[in-house]
Amino acid sequence: MTLISLLQAAAPAAGQAQGGSQWSFWIMIIALFVIMWFFMIRPQRKQQKELEKFRSELKKGDKVITAGGIYGTIGEIEEKTVLLKVDGDVKIRVDKSSIVRDTTDVQAQQK
């Protein structure tokens, strides 16, 4: 009989501990989400905004690289597309969103 009374006395204490661990579980989940947002999502949004600003400031004569690795000089800019002079008389029209980097400053420093 003493074993049963000990188990009955321990049951409410276990219920209270479980309630407390449930709160700590949710606090850990929320903290994990906040940390993930701070280190992963926030920097990615910042980088995306910088890339959008770069694309909106493109001008004729800029030397750029496309997402496919094509180097070219901007010859003409339209609302959503750009005409790239690739080599000699070779020109291609690419979507503005495929331009990822400006190499004008890099090539000037190498000379």
Image (cartoon, rainbow, N blue to C red):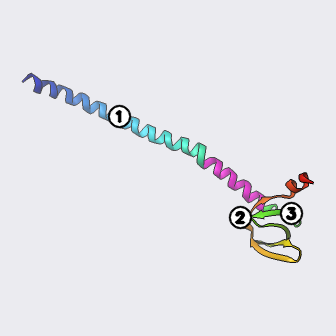
Q: Please state the horizontal and vertical placement of residue 58, each as a whole percent of the image.
A: 82, 63
- Range covered by the magenta-colored residues: 41-55
Residue 45 is covered by the magenta coloring: yes
The amino acid type, in three-letter code, at marker 1 is Ser
Quadrant in which the N terminus appears: top left
The amino acid type, in three-letter code, at marker 2 is Ala
- Choose between 23 and 89: the one closer to the eye: 89
Q: Please state the horizontal and vertical placement of residue 69, each as a whole percent of the image.
A: 74, 64
Determine the secondary structure under disc 2.
Answer: loop
Task: Say which residue label 2 marks.
Answer: 67
- Tag 1 near tag 2, CB within 8 Å: no
The amino acid type, in three-letter code, at marker 3 is Asp
Q: Please state the horizontal and vertical placement of residue 5, each as a whole percent of the image.
A: 12, 25
Picture layout, residue 28 above or below residue 49? above
Q: Is residue 76 visible?
A: no
Residue 54 is covered by the magenta coloring: yes
Task: Say which residue label 3 marks.
Answer: 62
Q: Classify 10 Å Cα crowding around label 1: few (below 14), some (14-19), many (20 and above).
A: few
Tell us which disc is closer to us: 1 or 2. Answer: 2
